[in-house]
Image (tube, rainbow, N blue to C red):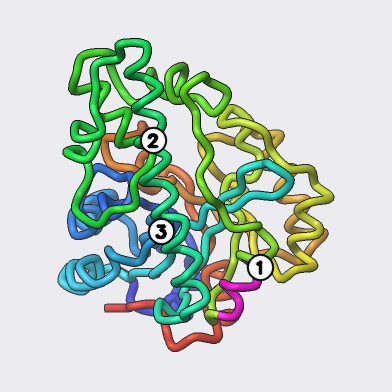
Amino acid sequence: MVGSLTAACGYPALVLIDLHAHSDASDGTESPATVMDQAHAAGLDVVALTDHDTTAGWESAAERAAALDLTLVRGIEISCVHDGVSIHLLGYLIDPSHQPLIDELGRARESRATRLERMVAKMAEDDIPITIEDVRQHSQQGATLGRPHIADALVASGYVRDRDEAFADILHSAGRYYVRHYSIEVMRAIELVRAAGGVPVMAHPFASKRGRIVSDDVIREMAQAGLSGIEADHRDHSSEERERAARLAAELDLVRTGSSDYHGTGKPNRLGENTTAPEALEAIEALATSDIRLLRP
């Protein structure tokens, strides 16, 4: 594995970097340590752990990454909103003790939990055979709860075959059982990530099959508010959407990233299927002002 990205920049083909992966600290199906094992098995040199609204997996991921000679980027994926449209914001190298950010993330996690209770109650009215206890059995204690945990309970009950089938209908954001949860206004989230010394990068901005997306003008506003990067290369983007994101990155002087958005067996996404250039990661590290650095071997 490559220990120094700076030394490796002349040989980008030798460095494989994936900046978006989830563990069972949120809606992935594998422990943080296992995600590191999978990253190593996939031939990655660098991987970011970016669980939803939590940094709970950082410590165990760091321990395992060190044992595997793997560079770890500590991050988070924050649930945001702008004018009613859901936006996901990746925050890299944040100070996890920054209290204003902690407070907002705590509010979001609590809202996610109560929201699931309301969704399951709606399903019960239509005799869908799961309970909130079933849902909780498919999450780790203290994990950020989300719709994937309902999906796992539905799979276990035999009501659907997999998470994809659950999200195509029952759990779709336009479906009858959908309930919104509290999300941070995205301009405020960008401000909080920057205040926590981190680097805000917009995740999968044009993933329209997930629901509504924001316009290019909103992304320009986000850049003015302090957005540092955009995840252009993602499974949920067509070639045209990747080009659109790349054009915006060039126009707005944003770091362009690529990532798998790995969730273990919860999604078909495979580690390393989209990657980030070493110089992009170096730019992210240079932009960070917290004491949180890349954890290199």
On residue 228, the disc is 1
| Residue 13, horizontal then vertical, whole percent | 46, 58
| Residue at (79% x, 62% y) in the render | 252
On residue 201, the disc is none
Disc 2 crowd rating (10 Å Cα; few below 14, some 14-19, many 20+) is: many
Mark 2 or mark 1: whose residue is earlier in sequence: 2
Q: Please, what secondary structure does the residue beneath circle 3 have?
A: loop
- In magenta, the rendered stretch is 190-195
Cα–Cα gap, marks 2 and 1: 28 Å
| Residue 240, horizontal then vertical, whole percent | 71, 34
Q: Main secondary structure of the magenta part?
A: helix
> Residue 215 magenta-drawn?
no
Q: Decide if residue 14 is on the left or right side of residue 104.
A: left
Please name the residue that numbered disc 3 is placed on.
50
Tag 1 and tag 3, C-beta contact below 8 Å: no
Residue type beneath disc 1: Ser
* Relative height, residue 65 to residue 217 (above, below): below
